[in-house]
Image: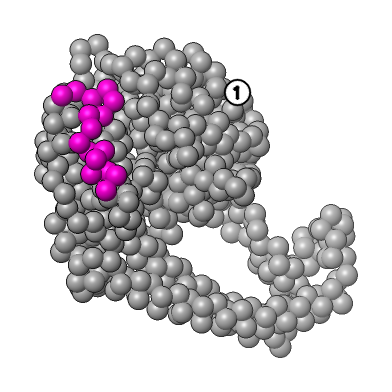
Amino acid sequence: MRSSVLPVLIVAALVAPAGADDFILTVGGGYSPSGNQVSLEKNVLFFGRVLEETAPAGVRHTILFADGDDPRRDVQYLDVESPLPRALELLARVFNETDHQFERYRDHEIPNAADAATTRNLIDWFDAVGRTLTGDDRLIIYVTAHGGASDDKKRPRNTRLHLWDNDDITVEQFAGELDRIAPEVPVVIVMVQCYSGGFADLIFEKANDSNGATRHNRCGFFATSHDRVAAGCTPDIDEADYREYSSAFWAAILGRSRVGEPVANADYDGDGVVSFAEAHASVLIHSDTIDIPVATSDAFLRSFSREKPGSSTLLANQANRRREPSGATSEESQAVVALKPFDPLTSDADVSALLAVADPVGRAVVEQLSERLGLIRSDRAAEARELAAGIEEERKRLRGQIGRLNRDSRRARGEIEKAVLAEWPELAGHWNPEARRLVSEEPDAIVALIESHPRFDRWEELDSEVHELEERRSDLERQWVKCQRLLATLETIALAHNLPLTADSGLILRYESLCEAESASLVRRANAK
C-alpha cells in the first residue's frame, strides 16, 4: 500500500501485450512424509481451481510437489473416523504419548505434478524455463510449504524454505535463482511458510537491503514476518477448518472460499478487479490467525524511509528531488520535481491525517481493522498499543494459571501411571509382546483400573480446564495480532508519505513501480471481465 507520493507519475499500463504468456510455478509439500500435511496438498488443489476460473487459457503451470511421481506414501492425514479402543486411548494419555495417534499416510493426489519439490528440481526449472522468459511474459510463484528461521544471527531475515528430502534454500539463494530471469520480466511471489517474511527481502539486490533495491521487476506477499511461525499446516482433512494465509488470499481473488462460501468483497479501489495487494489487505482485515503478513513494499519502505527524518536528510533530499533520476524519462523527472515540500508523518499522527494520505487499500485496512478491534480514538496507534498491552497482560496471567493446572495434571497422571505399572509392568515397554497381549486380551481390566483411580476424575477436570484456557489464550493472541497488523499498516502509510523526504528520486520511482506491480491482478487487465 502507498500514499500518493507521485500523483502525476506516468506508469506502464498493466495490459498484456499480444503474445504475452503467464508462467506459474507452484512449489508445495513438506520436507518429508511426516512434515507433508494434507493441507499443503489441498492448498495446491485449491490454487488450481482458482486458476481454472480466473486465469486466461494457455497459462503454463508447473507444479513441484513433495516426492513427485514416487508412488510411496508422502502425505500425512488424520483418520478421525476410526476411533481408538478405549484402552489404547487411556493408556496413551496415561503415558503422555498421544501424538501421532490418528495420523495416516497415503500417496499425494496432485494429478499433474511435474516433479518432486527438491532444491535440484527448483534450480533446474529456473535453468530450463525461468531464464527463457521475456519482458512480455509474467511469472507467478506460489509456495505452500514449511520454513525455518535464519541460521545467521547477523542476518535474521535470511530465512529458509524447507524443500523435499530435508533440504533448504535461503532467501539469498532464492534471490540468486530469480536473478537468472531477465530484469524486465514481472515476477509475483506468494509464500505461506513459517518465517516467510524474510523473503520480502527479494526486493533488494542479493536479498540484502545494504545493497540497495534490485533492478528486477518483482514483488511478493508473505504469510508472516521473518521471525514468526505461520498458521495453517494441518493433517486435518476438513478444508472448512483451514485457517491460513493463502486460503484467504486466493479466496479474496476468487470471491469464494475454498469450500464455496462467498467472502467479503476485496475490491477496495472499486476498479472491478481484486488485485494482489487487495487480496493481501483482505487477509490483514479478515484472517483470524496468528499471522502478521508482510509485502515487499513493507520491506522497501522500512529500509528506505523514516518516520522521523532528520533535518540533514530532509535538506539533502529536497535537493535530490530536483535532480533528474538516472534512466528516468522527462515526464517522470517532471513528476518528481513537481512534488511540493510537505511535513513528515509518524504512525502516531492523528488517524485522520494518515487516512488522508493513504491509498484505498491502506485506508480499508485501517478502518476495518479498527472497527473489528473497537478502536475509535484519533490517536489510533496509541490506542492499539494500549489494547495490545492489555491483551499481553491477560495472556501472561492465563499462562501462569495454565502452568499451575498443568503441574497438577502431571502429578495426577503420574499417580495413575504408577498404579497401572504396578499392576502390569509390561506396559512400560511398547514393543514388549506381552504389552500387546494385555491391550488385546485385557482391555476392560485396564480401563476399569484407570477410570476407578481416585485421581482420575480430577485429572479429567484439569485437562478440560487447561484446554479451555488455552483456547482463550489463542483467541487473545489473534486479537493481539490484529493490533500488530493495524500498527504496521499505520507505519507503512507514514513511511510511504515520508519517502520523498528520505530517498532520492530514483528510489521514489522504484517504489512507485513496486506498488504498481503489487497492484496487478491474477487476471491481466486485458483479460479482466
Residue found 66% across the figure and 65% down from its top: 89
Q: Is residue 486 above or below residue 512?
A: below
Residue found 84% across the figure and 65% down from its top: 428
Residue sticking out furthest to the bottom: 454
Horizontal side of 160 relative to 497 (left or right) equals: right
Q: At which x and y percent is residue 448?
A: 72, 78
Residue found 23% across the figure and 44% down from its top: 318
Q: At which x and y percent is residue 338?
A: 12, 38
Residue kind at label 1, given as amino acid type: Arg
Q: Quadrant of the C terminus?
A: top left
Horizontal side of 354 relative to 149 (left or right) equals: left
Residue found 29% across the figure and 33% down from its top: 506
The answer to whether residue 455 of the structure is visible from this angle is yes
Closer-to-camera residue (23/169)? 169
Closer-to-camera residue (207/270)? 207
Q: Is residue 334 above or below residue 58?
A: below
The answer to whether residue 444 of the structure is visible from this angle is no
User: Which residue range is magenta in the image?
Assistant: 315-330
Q: At which x and y percent is residue 343?
A: 19, 56
Q: Inspect the magenta stretch and tell me whether residue 75 lies in it.
A: no
Q: Is residue 130 above or below residue 96?
A: above
The residue that mark 1 highlights is 120
Mark 1: secondary structure: helix
Horizontal side of 343 relative to 126 (left or right) equals: left
